[in-house]
Image: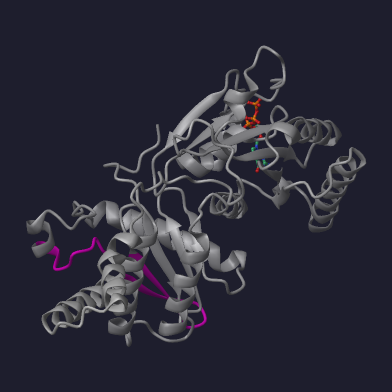
Amino acid sequence: MTSSVESSSAQSNSHDDSQEGFRTPTNLTLMKYLQELPDAERPPNPLQQQYHTGRVPNSKAGDGKPRLLLMGQRRSGKSSISGVVFHKLPPAETLYIETTIRVKKESMHSFMDFQIWDFPGHLDYFDPAFDVDKIFDEIGALIWVIDAQDEYLDAINRLNATILNLQNSYPNINIEVFVHKVDGLSEDYKMDTFRDIIQRVQDELSDAGYENAPVSFYQTSIYDHSIFEAFSKVIQKLIPQLPTLESLLNSLCANCRIEKAYLFDVLSKIYIATDTSPTDIGSYEICSDYIDVVVDIGEIYGWERPNENGESESEIEETGGTDCESLITMERKGNNYLYLKEINKYLALVCLMGDDSPAEKKALIDYNVGVFQKALSQVFPFSNGTNATTT
Ligand SMILES: Nc1nc2c(ncn2[C@@H]2O[C@H](COP(=O)(O)OP(=O)(O)OP(=O)(O)O)[C@@H](O)[C@H]2O)c(=O)[nH]1
């Protein structure tokens, strides 16, 4: 924005120069440079947006839809995770999920399009009958689910075999290990199991000559928010603009004295970015529960939103703003406040305000959130689907 303003004023100056006859070679070069400046900002062949791990992309097909593969032993909880996170399945109902027999592929259309592939536990992916390239091409992350309540040595062996098999052809795949079902374990046993699994995986991989494998570990359960937190971190690695989003949130927090700000995908309650101050699961839980409240109220009192380009003029007049907005101020224990604003049909900004009531400085917050929203639309290409649905 700024540079185009500068360049247009520079162009008018150069016009004045030519009228006054100061067409020296230096002036001509400068004029040419300034005239070409606006084009220089837009590459002639804009690259198709690619979501990848931030390292070398594995993409060959290049359809820009990263894949999340859910793998692991039978009954480790893969289908339950997918159901709870992406289909709002109540955790208790996962007891009735039947064993997966075929690979289940689902496309998620949200702030970014991606696919979830749920693999049956018994499948040997490296059997010659399977086209390995088809499975691991375009992969965003491989999520390996280990049942922490069960005997896990076999699971670790299979995980390591998979990592070693993939090492040559796909060395940049992010391997995310969910040490799952930790809800049933005591605090001590949970930590011991977690450490033991990390140690075994790392030792076996380095014994096999693979040092510094890109493996991350998370403790998860579908019965609390840990599965959403873990998924948030997995998804964040697929967003190349993450550092920009974080610094935008940082400056929003600094300008409005916000304690913690999350940018949520409303549908899945995955947060796609937060400011860089320390995160604790407690504040994530509050914000995510708050989204549930707003979504429920929105279902009763909501209205048809104007689209992203601000079209549908009558809607705008009716609601008095160009953005679809849902703004609630709520007091929680300890005199802290929460602020939520819908950024678009997929994303919502949720802020923990500390002790300052946002009602007293609403104008300041609204202004800064408006700036944030504009900056976000420039750095983050939102998908234009009509509905945030899963298929
Ligand atoms: N306690 C506890 N149980 C869970 C959790 N997640 C899943 N389960 C249970 O684990 C069982 C197996 O879950 P599934 O989702 O069917 O497992 P799967 O990995 O898809 O199994 P396959 O389809 O056979 O590969 C179900 O009874 C779930 O209720 C969890 O976080 N904690």
Residue 323 forms part of the magenta stretch: yes
Q: Which quarter of the figure has residue 251?
A: bottom left
Quarter of the image with the N terminus in it = bottom left
Q: Residue furthest top?
A: 129
Q: Position of residue 241 (x, y in %)?
A: 48, 58
Residue 299 place in picture, x, y as percent: 28, 51
Instruction: Find out whether residue 190 is within the magenta segment.
Output: no
- Does residue 297 sit above or below 147 in this rendering? below
* Left or right of 168 in this view: 246: left
Q: Is residue 292 left or right of residue 101?
A: left
* Relative to 105, 18 lies left or right: left
Q: Nearer the viewer, residue 390 or 296?
A: 390
Q: Tell which of 222 and 386 is nearer to you.
A: 386
Q: Quadrant of ligand 1?
A: top right
Write the start and end of the magenta stretch as one range. Answer: 318-341
Give the camera-side residue of 82 and 285: 82
In this picture, is 200 found above or below 297?
A: above
x 49%, y 57%: residue = 271
Q: Going 52% across and 82% down the picture, which residue do you hit?
A: 334
> Residue at position x 45%, y 39% from top?
64
Q: What residue is drawn where x is 18% and y is 58%?
A: 310
Identify the image quadrant of the C terminus: top left
Visible residue check, residue 326? no
Q: Is residue 37 visible?
A: yes
**371 left or right of 169?**
left
Q: Percent position (x, y) of residue 197?
A: 83, 46
When asked about the image quadrant of residue 15, the answer is bottom left
